[in-house]
Image (tube, rainbow, N blue to C red):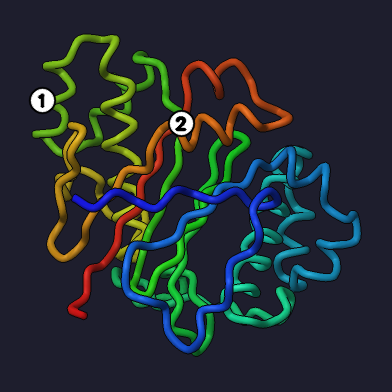
Amino acid sequence: MTSPRASRVVGRDPLPAAAAGAWPLGAPETWLLSVSRYVSAMDQGAPGKILDAEERERAAKFVRTEDQQRYTAAHVGLRELLGAYLDMEPAAVPFTREDCPGCGGPHGRPAVVGMPLHFNMSHAGDLVLFAFAGSPIGADVERVQPVSVVDQVAQSLHPTERAELAALAAVDRPAAFARCWTRKEAYLKGIGTGLSQDPAIAYVGTGERSVPVGPWTLTDLPTDHLAAAAADSAAASAADVTVGYAAAYALLEQAS
């Protein structure tokens, strides 16, 4: 299994070089964003200049300030990254939604109109994860949950995954569940259904080595990359640093 490239951090590392015409073959690129760091450094006028009317309207509807800041930072950051990859102004990036494979409605994977670049985004706590590739991709980041939450939510997993978790000591179940859940949600986002598809259907495994699902390969991001980004966050909590995060991406493999 090929190791993923190290995630870069939005606001700390230089923006990516433009992908001229087509995404190069190889591993996807992932980026992490600390919401609190990004918001504190962001020009206050940036959201009004970069986000479109629909994004601004949606951001304004959040009741809690932290939710509004997370949405705004994630979408401004996404536009900045896509603008760099596509060599265009962030505000000019034309978003669309692919058709849902389940019902055919316009709420499948997010996409850029007329561009070969695929992307996906996820957020949890103070972290946002972005993934970019030349073929369809899904991504997920989650805080590692206490065993009481794990034991409850695990009932929604594939029967074999439930059995694997039940065989582990309680202290080991949170990390194993987090690996499983981030792989599973990344895959479901990659195929465009999200959690509208029963998470018990596809088996992705709870062990340290992920299991491919058909043509989709699943890759865990190194926890030390996530821990470093969380520890660098201005809003890092004890849970962020000591309990940590898990993240994964699912990539549709295509013949070269």
**Which circle marks residue 245 in the picture?**
2
Drawn side of residue 185 relative to residue 168, left or right: right
Residue at 71%, 74% in the rendered image: 90
Is residue 40 shown above or below 160? below
Q: Residue at x 58, y 80 (%)?
A: 86
Q: Is residue 204 visible?
A: yes
Secondary element type, mark 2: strand
In the rendering, at what x and y percent does residue 191 appear?
30, 65
Q: Residues within 10 Å of mark 1 (few under 14, many from 20)?
A: few
Left or right position of 105 against 50: left
Amino acid under disc 2: Tyr
Q: Amino acid at mark 1?
A: Ala
For the point 51% across and 85% down, the residue is 20
Q: Quadrant of the C terminus?
A: bottom left
| Residue under numbered circle 1 | 163
Q: From this viewpoint, is residue 195 visible?
A: no
What is the secondary structure assignment of the residue under circle 1?
Answer: helix
Q: Quadrant of residue 222?
A: top left
In the depicted structure, whether residue 34 falls above or below residue 254: above
